[in-house]
């Protein structure tokens, strides 16, 4: 196991003993820790103010701005962790790929990857140059953890299947036609592309940990569109390759996918130490599927953020009761915070969980 620097919050601020890390390692905690996916950003008025006039990806790559946005929900809500303000396509932007976040659409790739020559061009890029391009990420994390102190930071990146699919489709998709066509007809090209994405994403994740993150999450937005057989053959080895970049570090490794109830065991086998569960699967059922030996994260339905306080309380109590079956439980939503969420409701949810 590689030791983290003495200046790392793991040692300098005791994040190794935080409620988040304790729950992630199956250690009893006085209260259930809580944070929210996509807590950094869209729903907060202070976020909209500081980001005015700056594109999404540019704001991710401005260290002062990324650090400020990451810390905003920790100040406002009292959550037990910050999550690094980024996007799953940031590693691709840093690798020189033309990509933008188009409001109302999502990531759009300027020149989608479709041919062997396109993949060869990616493979020809320098890993050393990419490491140098990670400088603003390291700086942003350093600035962030200086403010968070004893509150741990969760590092973040997208999983290779989802990121590679964006590169192939050119933008969001429901059918993944170009992606699956390459997987099935040219598995050799798919393996090369996914391997390249996994390497850059893994380096991106490791940079965050060495700069100060105390946990990581690998987010697979689109893996739920795959069969278990396809996941095992085409995806799992590449998600494992990302986790391998941080497997020698002591921090917890969270794996989360959308609509991936049937893939939980395979996703854990990719290298996770904590499994995120979306709101479609009760946590006690997830715990049973995983053999009762894996800490869980989740999984309040985000729709309850728009319901009555009584309905939210009932939902929270149900999630906590079911989560208590697992060796450890980190409270979260079953997906990201919707942009129109009332911030006061999130603050209320944190207080309810802590109480």
Image (cartoon, rainbow, N blue to C red):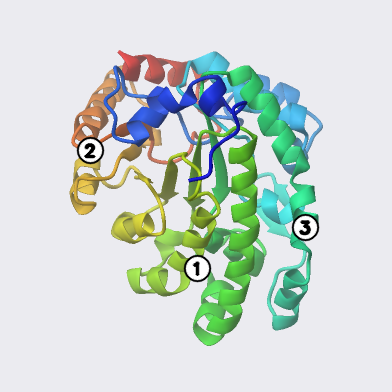
> In front of the other: label 1 or label 2?
2
**Disc number placed over residue 109 in the picture, else none:** none
For the point 52% across and 63% down, which residue is it?
Answer: 161
**283 or 330: which is nearer to us?**
330
Residue where numbered disc 2 is placed: 326
Q: Earlier in the sequence, mark 1 or mark 2?
A: 1
Residue where numbered disc 3 is placed: 128
Quadrant in the picture for residue 262? bottom left
Residue where numbered disc 1 is placed: 175
For the point 36% across and 29% down, which residue is it?
Answer: 22
Residue 45 at x, y = what percent? 64, 20
Instruction: Determine the secondary structure under disc 1.
Output: loop
**Left or right, residue 327 beside residue 304:** left
Disc 1 vs disc 2: Cβ atoms closer than 8 Å? no
Residue 79 at x, y = what percent? 46, 21
Q: Classify 81 as above or below 94.
A: above
Instruction: Determine the secondary structure under disc 3.
Output: helix
**154 or 89: which is nearer to us?**
154
> In front of the other: label 3 or label 1?
3
Instruction: Determine the secondary structure under disc 2.
Output: loop
Q: Earlier in the sequence, mark 3 or mark 1?
A: 3
**Left or right, residue 241 beside residue 141:** left
In the rendered image, which quarter contains the C terminus? top left
Can residue 98 be seen? no
Within-10-Å neighbours for mark 3: few <14, some 14–19, many 20+ = few
Disc 3 vs disc 1: Cβ atoms closer than 8 Å? no
Q: Earlier in the sequence, mark 2 or mark 3?
A: 3
């Amino acid at each position: 196991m590689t030791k983290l620097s003495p200046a790392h919050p793991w040692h300098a601020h005791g994040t190794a003993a935080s409620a988040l890390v304790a729950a992630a390692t199956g250690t009893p905690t006085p209260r259930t820790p809580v944070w929210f996916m996509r807590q950094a950003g869209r729903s907060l008025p202070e976020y909209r103010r500081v980001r005015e006039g700056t594109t999404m990806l540019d704001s991710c790559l401005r260290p002062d701005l990324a650090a400020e946005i990451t810390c905003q929900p920790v100040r406002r809500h009292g959550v037990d962790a910050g999550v690094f303000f980024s996007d799953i396509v940031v590693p691709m932007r840093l690798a020189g790929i033309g990509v933008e976040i188009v409001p109302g659409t999502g990531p759009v790739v300027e020149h989608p990857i479709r041919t062997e020559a396109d993949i060869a061009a990616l493979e020809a890029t320098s890993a050393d140059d990419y490491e140098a391009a990670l400088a603003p990420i390291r700086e942003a994390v350093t600035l962030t953890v200086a403010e968070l102190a004893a509150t741990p930071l969760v590092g973040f990146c997208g999983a290779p299947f989802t990121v590679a699919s964006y590169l192939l489709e050119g933008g969001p998709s429901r059918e993944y036609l170009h992606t699956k066509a390459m997987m099935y007809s040219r598995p050799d090209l798919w393996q090369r592309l996914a391997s390249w994405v996994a390497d850059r994403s893994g380096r991106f994740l490791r940079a965050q940990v060495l700069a100060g993150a105390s946990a990581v999450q690998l987010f697979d937005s689109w893996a739920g569109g795959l069969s278990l057989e396809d996941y095992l053959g085409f995806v799992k080895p590449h998600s494992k390759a990302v986790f391998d970049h941080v497997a020698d570090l002591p921090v917890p490794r969270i794996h989360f996918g959308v609509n991936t109830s049937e893939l939980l065991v395979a996703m854990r086998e990719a290298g996770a130490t904590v499994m995120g569960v979306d709101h479609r699967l009760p946590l006690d059922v997830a715990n049973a599927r995983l053999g009762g030996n894996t800490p869980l994260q989740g999984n309040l339905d985000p729709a309850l953020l728009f319901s009555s306080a009584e309905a939210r309380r009932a939902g929270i109590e149900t999630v906590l009761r079911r989560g208590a079956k697992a060796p450890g439980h980190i409270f979260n939503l079953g997906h990201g915070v919707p942009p129109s969420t009332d911030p006061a409701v999130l603050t209320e949810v944190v207080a309810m969980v802590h109480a």
